[in-house]
Image (cartoon, rainbow, N blue to C red):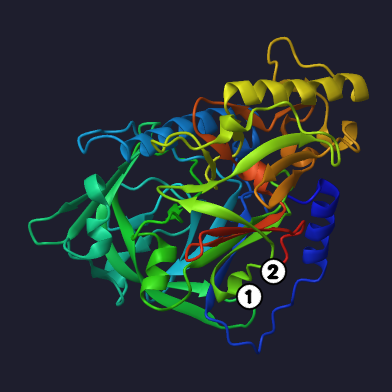
Amino acid sequence: MASVNNLLLIICFTFIFSPCISAASDFKGFSTNLIHIHSPSSPYKNVKAESLAEDTALKSTLSRHAYLRARQQKALQPADFVPPPLIRDKSAFLANLSIGNPPTNVYVVLDTGSDLFWIQCEPCDICYKQKDPIYNRTKSDSYTEMLCNEPPCVSLGREGQCSDSGSCLYQTAYADGARTSGLLSYEKVAFTSHYSDEDKTAQVGFGCGLQNLNFITSNRDGGVLGLGPGLVSLVSQLSAIGKVSKSFAYCFGNISNPNAGGFLVFGDATYLNGDMTPMVIAEFYYVNLLGIGLGVGEPRLDINSSSFERKPDGSGGVIIDSGSTLSVFPPEVYEVVRNAVVDKLKKGYNISPLTSSPDCFEGKIERDLPLFPTLVLYLESTGILNDRWSIFLQRYDELFCLGFTSGEGLSIIGTLAQQSYKFGYNLELSTLSIESNPDCGF
């Protein structure tokens, strides 16, 4: 593996000299902007900024970790194993798509930990309040119901059922008591190309949510865009119908900056140019995390790499997840990393953890942590360099907290650790491309 100094040089070189996209180029790809929830151009800019509060991020990350471990166990257990319901993490970035004919604008959360793309649909039995108009299937001339014997429906397993008329039904539950169910259907989805003024469309399967219960009224999104490797996921469907290669990429800007942007792309337009690391594609996207260091060029922290290994029975391991805000490490890893970060805060910045909240500190990241050492996640053949904005999360005006937490078994690299990088998933070659992109420019 290259040294960290060489790694940094390679990443910067890749970023600076990556090819530009020509409007005249003929690429088979789809793309859409990611909008920060509090961006001036966001329809939800006046919603309370709870998604950036560490206590919300911590609770949702831990609940999601429990769900992801349950999904992992489901793949290992007998068919009658029923996992606890999942929780939808609150995201700082939403994907903007249009669906139907005439088109309805929708905002959805990206989720690499699940497969189904679903939105609220009218006329519905129960719909929660959302800021943007709810899609109405009866007013679209491109809407059709999916039959229960079609592969996307069959792939839902226990979450799919067959109606008396032969239509496919879906149901999904969440740990906070919310649940959605409805029809698995086909509809025209439009993506705005970044390299031309053309809108690209595809007829894809999606969950048309007719009963959406116990969702809080301040919810900002209209549904979830599943990016997992399953047959029903959007990336698998677009590839199966010959629209794009089986690949996608995204980039999250600085979560703490409401003016930050991002993008999501599918197919050839993903430009998988960054440093490559192998992935194991199972129910999630697994990567090989070899170690962690604090400071570029500094020795790695004293962590046994076996803590990150995926066990022969399929448990454990490290996944990349767009639905978890914080990263999650096994307790023995978390303690080592936390102690190193806290020691640097005490000795270099005269900042100590709060007695009442040992993972939180008084102050402001931008003002009080100049030149804080980089946290390096050493992956096979490459790495991720996390600056202060990825190591910490500003909870309140004068309080910041760690951007990682502790959890047994499965390790997660969350969105804080991913921000300011382009992550490209090649499902055909089972590789993950990682490219520095501070401004998330496409």
Mark 2 — residue? 442
Which residue does the image show at 56% across and 38% down from the upper left? 412
Query: Callout 1 environment at 10 Å: few (<14), some (14 to 19), or many (20+)?
Result: many
- Give coordinates of residue 32: x percent, y percent: 57, 67
Q: Nearer the viewer, residue 300 or 71?
A: 300
- Residue 192 visible in rendering: no
Q: Identify which amino acid the numbered label 1 is placed on.
A: His
* Residue type beneath disc 2: Phe
In the image, residue 48 above or below residue 361? below
Residue sitting at the far top: 355
The image quadrant that residue 274 belongs to is: bottom right
Q: In the current view of this chain or complex, which residue is farthest to the bottom?
A: 24
Q: Quadrant of the C terminus?
A: bottom right
Residue 295 appears in the figure: yes
Pointer 1 residue: 194
Q: Nearer the viewer, residue 8 or 193?
A: 8
Q: Establish if 209 lies above or below 377.
A: below
Q: Position of residue 378 (x, y in %)?
A: 70, 43
Is residue 89 positioned above or below 235 on the image?
A: above
Residue count near mark 2 (Cα–Cα under 10 Å), binned few <14, some 14–19, many ≥20: many
